Image: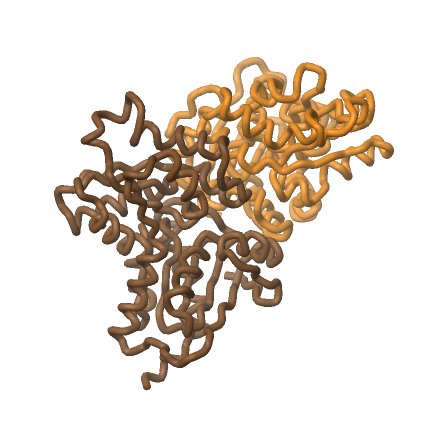
Chain colours: A orange, B brown
Amino acid sequence: MHRSVSLPIGMFDSGVGGLTVLKALRDRLPCEDILYLGDTARLPYGTKSPETVSRYAVQASGKLVDRGVKLLVVACNTASSVALDALRAAYPAIPVIGVVEPGAQASCAASRTGSIAVIATESTIRGNAYQKAIHALRPEAHVLGRPCPLFVPLAEEGWLDGALVEGIAARYLDPIFAGEVAGPAEERPDCLVLGCTHFPLLAGAIRNVIGPEVAMVDSAETTARAVEAELGRQGLLRTAPGCGTSRFLTTDDVSRFARTGSLFLGMTIGVDDVELVDL
Amino acid sequence: MHRSVSLPIGMFDSGVGGLTVLKALRDRLPCEDILYLGDTARLPYGTKSPETVSRYAVQASGKLVDRGVKLLVVACNTASSVALDALRAAYPAIPVIGVVEPGAQASCAASRTGSIAVIATESTIRGNAYQKAIHALRPEAHVLGRPCPLFVPLAEEGWLDGALVEGIAARYLDPIFAGEVAGPAEERPDCLVLGCTHFPLLAGAIRNVIGPEVAMVDSAETTARAVEAELGRQGLLRTAPGCGTSRFLTTDDVSRFARTGSLFLGMTIGVDDVELVDL
């Protein structure tokens, strides 16, 4: 057995949003240990410059690498958009998987027409990361990006459905999927990528706004598949029976991380499972 | 004339929200030069721990002190709540004025009943800074605090009025000022403190929700008065005719600062007036 098999998978995010990716990974690979770092002291990454995000990503990942991890998941769309090259240069011995490429793959598979909308934070959209990743797979695709900054605090408040949430979603999405400004029905996107790890919590409200016909891609599930494939390729998959553990590191208030994180993970995180670290 | 009179007033905030305070200061003291630092690379401060906010505040203020300022305005409610002691210890030669105490003074003057509501970021509310400042002036006051995290991205999106904004405001404020849960009318607060520098942009929508009877206190104007008084006390008021200048420092994207900042300042900030600095 490869000596690294027993090491945990390292994941990091600017905060708790990446826990939606952890949840998908846990469902798919229940034997793996996972060490998650949420850089809550410096969130959100989505409003920061690419240089700042890359620097923070290398620092956060360094903390995980120091503890020993066999693979690094960048469970943050902003960092996946701008920091993968810097991370691979900084830690060449460790496979690095982001959430953008798996999401792009899933959207190319789901779209019939090749017209794909992406919603994300402002910096993910400005960086055109999904557009580039989708065009690499499907050069003729038409990709339309829309930042939805209010979705992040909505998810963190736990305001996940109802008229108000759908009203905000409609203000962002109607110009793309409905109404006079959206263009002829046949030219509208037939696929919507949730390009921020917070957004799956609002999937029900978003579905009510875009209607049943539009395919909705959440990159958490597709990222979990990509992690499984990469670990398999490297002979690092842990297949022993029994349940893996999840441990959490945060750069700010432990009790706040446990409380908000439980909402994103869909199960209770105990304060004892969270450790405060300085970067 | 005191040799420091000609120095600018230094102001800092985690981002662009403090520009509502700069605007009030410019209206009141048009002859003064102002040097403003927005620590946009690390915003928002409102979700961070008091220790982290204090450390960031001392770093940001150090940059202004190095350039030479005659007084320091902490134009950020979160930092004013937790970092004033650290700032006064770090820079003992420079008067430091925050936004919390002037806002508390104004609310004590405006409330007839002594029942006062404060809306702010989560960390300002958790830190009880307004409660402490109000109780120091009016020990029998009843202070009710409510975090309103969605107001910050609403202001930054420029979604300042209309049904959606009032719907969000109502979700936060109806439990305090209206409806079954708000308690008997005579026990409801008769004063609302806008305890975050972003919130004055939403004052119209907030007014429509709370009705015409509740006094609304915005600490920008009262902070400007406090600055004038302190400069006068120290013989540092600049009274020469002519218009003072405003210069801006930011720790992240200059063009984004100029664009969003213009919304908060109510006038255009040129990219040439903004300088990128590293803390």
Q: Where is residue A248 in the image (x, y as percent from the top left)?
A: 47, 32
Place of residue B197 in the rendered image (x, y in percent of width and height, measured from the top left): 41, 50
**As displayed, is residue A89 above or below residue A193?**
below
From the viewer's perspective, tell me whether residue B210 is left or right of residue B43.
Answer: left
B130 left or right of A109?
A: left
Q: Residue at x 46, y 42 (%)?
A: B152
Q: Is A256 situated above or below A190?
A: below
Residue farthest to the right, as pictured: A140
**Front in this rendered view, residue A275 or B63:** B63
> What residue occupies the far bottom of the structure in this picture?
B1
Q: Residue at x 66, y 27 (%)?
A: A219
Residue A39: tell me if it is visible: no
Left or right: residue A168 versus residue A142 is left
Front in this rendered view, residue B216 or A138: B216
Residue farthest toward the front in the current orientation of the protein? B212
Along the horizontal axis of the image, is B138 left or right of A6? left
Q: How many marks?
A: 0
Instruction: Check the picture and name the quadrant holding the N terminus of chain A.
Output: top right
Q: In this view, does A74 lie above or below B183?
A: below
Indicate the quadrant where residue B102 lies: bottom left
Residue B184 appears anywhere in the view: yes
Residue A48 place in picture, x, y as percent: 58, 49
Residue drawn at (41%, 67%) of the image: B10
Foreground of the two, A210 or A278: A210
Residue closer to the observer: A59 or B121: B121
Residue A207, by quadrant, is top right
User: At 42% across and 42% down in the image, what residue appears?
Assistant: B204
| Residue A29 percent location from the top left of the image | 61, 19
